[in-house]
Amino acid sequence: MNRLLSHTRPPTPLKPRWPKLAIGLCLTVSAQADFKALDDHTMSKVTGQSGLTLELDLQLNIREIAYRDEGYLSLKDVAWGGADRTGHTGVTGRFENWKMVIDIVDGATPMSYGFSDLDHYYNLVDAPDAAWAAAIANNDEAQFHGDGDLVIHNTSVELFDGSVYDRETDSDRALAGGPTHLPGNAFADAIDDWRNSAPFGVRIGAVTLNNARYAVGSNPADGTTLISNFNAEVLTGPLDIIIQNRGNGSTQGVPDSKMMISDYFEISDLSVNIDLFAMSISGFRFHNRRGDTTGLNYHRGADGILGTPDDRATESFGFGHMKWYLGSVSGSALQIGGAIKGDIDIDAIALSDDGVSIGNVEITDLKIEYSMNVRGH
């Protein structure tokens, strides 16, 4: 592994504390000093040679979000924060242990992308099993981006704490060996540990339609409830955001400059009432553990060129994968395009208010590709 160099006396990180939002701001400062090689543990936390790292601790509560046209569409009692691990799907406490590593790149430096960090962590494992070798042979590659592109690599501050998510009890369960900040020798344990490192919950009390006389912030009885009691818990994988610096043109109808997002995630539990159709869903999960377990990213192959016949898909390691982009089309429309890939399980679907399940559903190797232009009228 190539080793970067570090000052023997690095500057002290600046870590201001804001209410409900703790941000650690680490600045790389050029200075005359002796240099030493970074060890593998330090290398595992390096994305680029400069930039910003923001560490996030956040809880969000909103009474109502209302969209007004002639009438109103409103979301009521919205909450976003930590996952509720007490047997009740939803939100409790703060979303924490999350960092954003931000760089404006020069086009010549490879940047962490997707699961490329596994290459670093593999070198910290005492006795990796065969699955570790298979994982690093099939994980995402570090990416080269265009000169001047803005790159944001999001992942957990501490990926490994020795716990996994136990869906049967909706709680955290300790792995054998106890708490640790390093990956385990068994790759299956290590990736489950990673999967559990920064879960979050989402709650929406109701989504309603109301007429033009609706008073925002009230709760009238004459509106139409579309859905209610939406609660979800999500396990986070790597999230990459790249804003391309390509000018204001387009190629074959796709904006040259756009924001591109690659997101690995797993919905570990979701429940919702679909009031408009007298239906409820519980035990909804989205993952990628059956059938084709690769994601939407590709290795560049032996020739080192993406988009040639020797490219091969990379593993998603059990996470569902979504890639999408947003950009302006000729300055007149917002263009959104992308794909999502994974498996779906639904434990119970109930019709009417009696709550009696009519059965469960399992969908394997779902892949949806989409593109749309959004304009006002």
Image: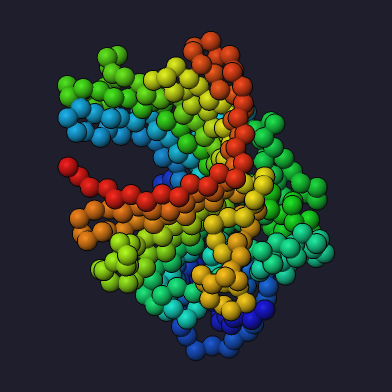
The residue positioned 54% from the left and 51% from the top of the image is 321
User: x and y percent of residue 106 in the render?
Assistant: 42, 79
Count of marks overlaid on the render:
0
**Chosen colour scheme:** rainbow
Q: Quadrant of the N terminus?
A: bottom right
Q: Is residue 184 left or right of residue 60?
A: right
Q: Is 332 or 193 nearer to us in this picture?
A: 332
Q: Is 339 or 179 nearer to us in this picture?
A: 339
The reply to whether residue 184 is in sight is: no
User: x and y percent of residue 50 in the render?
Assistant: 47, 75
User: x and y percent of residue 84 in the render?
Assistant: 57, 34
Q: Is 22 or 131 nearer to us in this picture?
A: 131
Q: Quadrant of the C terminus?
A: top left
User: x and y percent of residue 370 in the render?
Assistant: 41, 49
The reply to whether residue 281 is in sight is: yes
Q: Which residue of the protein is positioned furthest toward the front in this rendering?
A: 309
140 to 320, vertically: above or below:
below
The residue positioned 67% from the left and 35% from the top of the image is 167
285 to 133, vertically: above or below:
above
Q: Is 187 or 299 nearer to us in this picture?
A: 299
The residue positioned 54% from the left and 18% from the top of the image is 350
143 to 130, vertically: above or below:
below
The residue positioned 43% from the left and 70% from the top of the image is 103
Q: Is residue 244 left or right of residue 100?
A: left
